[in-house]
């Protein structure tokens, strides 16, 4: 069965349970004690067999973290996080000596990914997607490695890249998100466990979608993903990440840093389908998703495009941004954020225009149901040298029911008179006559809501790679189950 | 097929339908005519199950089932179709996709397998051609930026693809020019058979020149005040509602 088909089938089988990925896998794990201190950081670094410069970098970040307050700007109710009551590293014992091929991976882990609809066996990878799978703190497997390396493309876990491509990592790690950016960024820099590393050499157009699947399995474990993507001159890459976690009563922490660098004429397309466990209907449990994603369009004519579908997590705090340094560079942000029940999301983007003729486009669709709160927060900043900069922003909010909230907080700062900034915003309630019309044609109320909401999100979903657009559409419908009627 | 007995309906405490009786057999076409505010559209919404309408008294039997026990989508999937007076716009949803979803909802309800893409495309092409609908139109978002006539034709296309047992046309003729009226009527006439029934709600006799009903009913103040055959429609056109209602 093709991976796509399997994924779709996987999604179809859900329906009844509210969160379909809520299972956990029984595995022996290696975990240092709870808590955050220099020894834990040294432990993580030693487990990964890291060179000294990497450990020093982490320790420095930890010092910075200790000095920084928690970011407070978001319209979120974030409970006090006890950083000492969390595990910072967990790997299944069977992965301690990193498996050399897929055959050496614990069958339980393979089974977990199969349940998720993510086949790791290369012979099943018919859909042309290379997958890197991160299980708790370690990368499990990267498929298609050989084919990619023939093109000079590096696609591996960041831990591996630290050893195999230290020059690139040293040059670019932290160059887009400085360690001192804010406390979550510093925390991630200190304790990051794994994530993907991609380097596309000059002139290469990556022929397959590169994809990472993140899974938090172990209890009380934070996941600190670190991803670094570098697209060298005249190159192109499309990358997709997916995320799930088991259902657990306690909250779990996910603080990721993702850095993208696009050089002259390069293009990076980064898509996310985030479906971390959102907690139950009363708001118990769920993932705290504090993510810093930032892309630098360093080269002229470069382009970075973020597409995100955010349906999970108890709290989402996330602003994928573009720094448009190169002349004529382009930044795009397409977002669907769905909150249901007690979920909270504060998400948006920053577009920093530095180079001449830079342009950016922001399309944000927020859907709120149950008692959820959904905020779009965006900054368009046009600096004085950014002659002829252009921005177009469109923020639409859709409310389902009368206990939820939608908020739009756009900041626009322009320091030159040649620039043009457009902003459109709408807020609407799902229309009962539309629902009635769909139901009169035989759709049940949930399918009707799914259909209408998918229509509302179409402008964003159509930017996802084909295979994932289908999955995302089903996810949109599933995450709103029980929101009407 | 449909048996309405002593129906009383109110909305927000206001009585709209006050003791309506109507019986429609398989294969029959009934026209319901009446002035504004007489309860015509209310009847179509009550039959299709729109909420906010309070059924104060009476029964509605449909195909040996208690219609009032069924949800909106169940009624639809049991073959009851309402052609809307004001079809809804659904941005971002392609018309053809909507049609396919509707067909497959019904098939799922009936325990049948989904219609595959090819079979669907063939059916859609065939039905669209019958109604003189350019299939390019079906690639657009459902009813978005459709003209009044296009919307109504599209309703009839949906009807023809879903082939209902009981179709209610709620003022389908309003806002149609003469050509569109003819096409829409032809669509309805093609569907007529011994197996299905129609309730055609209209203000004007004009539509009934094209869709010849077996029975004509005149509704006034929430009640059917007079019933007859096609000649009643002609009489109505001549005398007007007021006189007919008075003489009833």
Image: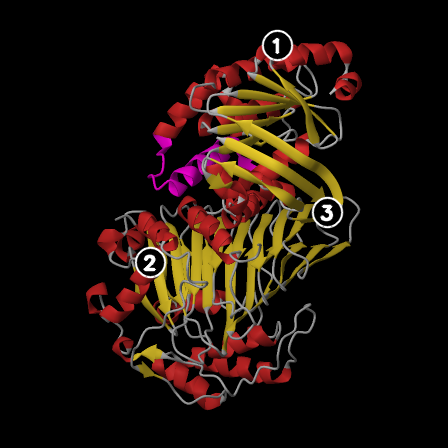
Q: Same chain, marks 1 and 3?
A: no
Disc 1 to disc 3, C-alpha distance: 52 Å
Is label 1 or label 2 in front? 1
Q: Same chain, marks 2 and 3?
A: yes
SS at circle 2: loop
Query: Is residue A455 visible to us here?
Result: yes
Would you say the residues marked 1 and 2 are in contact, meaning their CB atoms lie under 8 Å apart?
no
In this rendering, the answer to whether B78 lies above or below A143 is above
**Quick one: label 3, few (<14), some, or many (20+) residues within 10 Å?**
few
Disc 2 marks which residue?
Answer: A118
Residue found 77% across the figure and 12% down from its top: B239
Range drawn in magenta: B89-118
Residue found 70% across the figure and 37% down from its top: B18
SS at circle 1: helix
Task: For mark 1, name the chain.
Answer: B
Left/right placement of residue B243 relative to residue A468 reads: right
Disc 2 to disc 3, C-alpha distance: 39 Å
**Quick one: label 2, few (<14), some, or many (20+) residues within 10 Å?**
many
Residue extending furthest toward the front: B248
Work out which quarter of the rendered image holds the C terminus of chain A and state it.
bottom right
Q: Which mark is residue A423?
A: 3
Is label 1 or label 3 in front? 1
In this rendering, the answer to whether A305 lies above or below A193 is above
Disc 1 to disc 2, C-alpha distance: 61 Å
- Looking at this view, is A322 or B228 the one in front? B228
Q: Which mark is residue A160?
A: none
In this rendering, the answer to whether B182 lies above or below A261 is above
- Looking at this view, is A48 or A478 the one in front? A478
Is residue B92 one of those drawn in magenta? yes
Disc 1 marks which residue?
Answer: B209
């Amino acid at each position: 069965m093709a991976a796509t088909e399997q994924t779709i089938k996987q999604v179809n089988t859900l329906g009844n349970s509210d969160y379909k990925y809520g299972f956990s896998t029984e595995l022996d794990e290696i975990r240092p004690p709870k808590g955050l201190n220099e020894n834990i950081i040294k432990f993580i670094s030693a487990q990964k067999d890291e060179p000294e410069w990497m450990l020093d970098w982490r320790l420095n970040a930890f010092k910075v973290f200790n000095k920084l307050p928690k970011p407070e700007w978001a319209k979120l109710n974030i409970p006090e996080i006890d950083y000492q009551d969390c595990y910072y590293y967990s790997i299944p014992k069977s992965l301690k000596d990193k498996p050399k091929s897929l055959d050496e991976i614990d069958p339980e882990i393979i089974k977990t990914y199969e349940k998720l609809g993510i086949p790791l066996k290369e012979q099943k990878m018919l859909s042309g997607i290379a997958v890197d799978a991160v299980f708790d703190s370690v990368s499990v497997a990267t498929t298609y490695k050989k084919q990619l390396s023939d093109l000079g493309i590096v696609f591996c876990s960041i831990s591996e890249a630290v050893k195999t491509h230290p020059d690139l990592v040293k040059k670019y790690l932290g160059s887009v998100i400085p360690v001192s950016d804010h406390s979550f960024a510093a925390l991630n820099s200190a304790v990051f466990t794994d994530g993907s590393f991609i380097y596309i050499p000059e002139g290469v157009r990556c022929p397959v979608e590169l994809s990472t699947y993140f899974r938090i399995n172990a209890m009380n474990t934070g996941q600190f993903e670190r991803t670094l993507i570098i697209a060298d001159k005249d190159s192109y890459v499309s990358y997709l990440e997916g995320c799930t976690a088991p259902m657990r009563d306690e909250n779990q922490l996910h603080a990721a840093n993702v850095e993208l660098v696009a050089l002259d004429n390069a293009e990076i397309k980064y898509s996310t389908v985030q479906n971390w466990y959102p907690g139950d209907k009363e708001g118990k449990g769920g993932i705290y998703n504090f993510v810093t994603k930032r892309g630098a369009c360093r080269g002229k004519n470069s382009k970075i495009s973020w597409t995100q579908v955010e349906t999970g997590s108890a709290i989402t705090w996330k602003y994928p941004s573009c720094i448009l340094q190169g002349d004529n560079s382009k930044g795009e942000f397409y977002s669907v954020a769905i909150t249901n029940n007690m979920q909270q999301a504060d998400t948006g983007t920053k577009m920093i225009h530095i180079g001449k003729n830079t342009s950016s486009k922001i399309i944000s669709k927020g859907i709120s149901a149950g008692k959820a709160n959904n905020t779009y927060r965006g900054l368009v900043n046009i600096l004085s040298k950014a002659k002829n900069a252009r921005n177009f922003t469109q923020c639409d909010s859709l409310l389902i029911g009368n206990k939820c909230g939608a908020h739009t907080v756009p900041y626009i700062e322009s320091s030159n008179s040649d620039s043009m900034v457009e902003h459109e915003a709408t807020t609407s309630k799902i229309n009962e006559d539309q629902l009635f019309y769909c139901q009169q044609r035989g759709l049940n109320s949930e399918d009707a809501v799914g259909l209408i909401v998918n229509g509302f999100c179409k402008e964003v979903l159509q930017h996802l790679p084909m295979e994932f657009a289908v999955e995302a559409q089903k996810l949109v419908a599933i995450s709103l189950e029980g929101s009407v009627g | 097929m449909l048996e309405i007995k002593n129906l009383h309906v109110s909305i927000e405490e206001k009585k709209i339908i006050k003791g309506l009786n109507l019986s429609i057999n398989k294969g029959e076409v009934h026209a319901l005519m009446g002035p504004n505010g007489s309860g015509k559209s209310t009847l179509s919404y009550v039959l299709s199950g729109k909420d906010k309408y309070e059924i104060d008294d009476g029964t509605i039997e449909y195909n040996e089932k208690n219609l009032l026990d069924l949800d909106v989508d169940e009624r639809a999937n049991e073959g009851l179709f309402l052609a809307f007076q004001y079809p809804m716009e659904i941005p971002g949803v392609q018309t053809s996709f909507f049609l396919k979803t509707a067909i497959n909802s019904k098939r799922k309800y009936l325990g049948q397998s989904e219609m595959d893409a090819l079979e669907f495309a063939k059916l859609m092409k065939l039905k669209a051609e019958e109604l003189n609908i350019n299939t390019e139109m079906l690639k657009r978002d459902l009813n978005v930026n459709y003209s009044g006539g296009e919307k109504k034709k599209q309703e009839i296309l949906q009807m023809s693809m879903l082939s209902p047992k009981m179709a209610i046309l709620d003022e389908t003729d309003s806002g149609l020019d003469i050509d569109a009226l003819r096409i829409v009527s032809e669509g309805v006439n093609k569907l007529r058979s011994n197996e299905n029934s129609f309730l055609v709600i209209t203000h004007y006799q004009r539509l009934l020149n094209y869709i010849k009903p077996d029975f004509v009913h005149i509704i006034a103040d929430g009640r059917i005040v007079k019933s007859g055959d096609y000649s009643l429609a002609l009489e109505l056109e001549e005398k007007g509602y007021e006189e007919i209602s008075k003489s009833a």
